[in-house]
Amino acid sequence: VTNRSAEPATFRVYAADAKTDYDTAAFTLIGADRASTDLGAWTAVHDGPAACANPADASCAAGLGIVLALEPGARADIPITITVPHDASPGDHAAGIVASFSTGAGDGAASVRRENRVGTRIYLRVDGALHAGVGASGAVAGYNANLNPFAAGSGFVGVDVANTGNTRLSVQPSLRFTGPFGIELGTVVLPEVRNLMPGGTGHVTASVPGIPPLLLLFAEVVLAPTPADGVAAEDPLPAPTRASAEAWAVPWSLLALVALLLGGGWIVLRIRRRRRELLAQDFADYADVIRAEERAHQTARMAGSAPDPAAPDLVGAERAATVFDKENAR
């Protein structure tokens, strides 16, 4: 351990079990508030304690390892001892040797303490029957439509990648999108998941742009095992595994535009039809008035009165009403 700062520093040096972080699928170590139960508990730093009776006891976990004070630029070589229990499970185990340095900021109730941790990995293999395996579960797919109704959107996929064997391995995921009737929409290779721990699970996500909205989207994820670091690089690899998921790829913005156009067209047709109905009613009322005047004119003639020269042309009115009725029927 080397103090590279310009001030004296006090470090806590201890061992911690390794794990696979679910959110990033990366190699990491358990938190400082928990005690190790696997390789970290088998690893004693110098003469300090390595394990706790209750792994969840934070006060015990805080006392694991040793406390080391170093002057600026000073270095200390610290021995470690790994004691493998007789009932240790065969296969790969991993841990890390951590040098932790805490700093404080501010005083009072609002103060914040920050813990900085650096470390180096330990990979250990226990003799026995070895078997490698990789699994996929919880695959989900989705589609994000573009606001532009004539542009492609993006498809996304999430899947859990699990090491189902007892040896470390890495995984190279790849993603293939297809549409209805097997239409190819794109294939991408995702970042490699390195050193997936036995029993560990990591969540892998990917988003692929340029996917057209073809109503249905089919996603297939292929997990191809690759060699891990260290001695595990010589292990035989299991067969690739696959996971699939489907999602609706609906062009909502395009459907909204079509609905707007259809709705606007219906409103225009409705307005025109209403206007024609009102005009037809006006024409019918006018024809009724003409017929009433004609009947009055006929009555006056039968009574011997002279015809009114200002009377309207009933024949023309009847013809106009007939023509309008025919046009309105069309």
Image: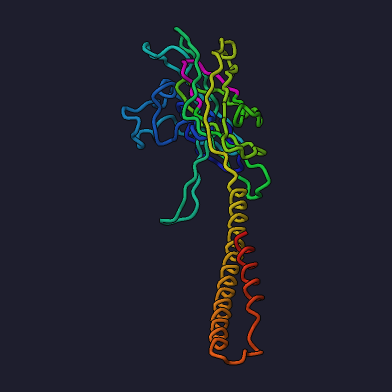
Quadrant in which the C terminus is drawn: bottom right
Residue in view at x 66 percent, y 42 percent? 152
Q: In the displayed image of the protein, which residue is found farthest to the bottom? A: 305
Quadrant in which the N terminus is drawn: top right
Q: Position of residue 325 (x, y in %)?
A: 60, 66
Q: Which of 164 and 280 is in front in this view?
A: 280
Q: Nearer the viewer, residue 288 or 256?
A: 288
* Left or right of 61 in this view: 167: right
Q: In this view, does 254 lie above or below 173?
A: below
Q: In this view, does 325 lie above or below 245?
A: below
Residue in view at x 62 percent, y 55 percent? 261
The region drawn magenta spans 161-172
Residue 94 visible to the viewer:
no
Q: In this view, does 13 lie above or below 166?
A: below
Residue in view at x 61 percent, y 36 percent? 73
Magenta segment includes 255: no
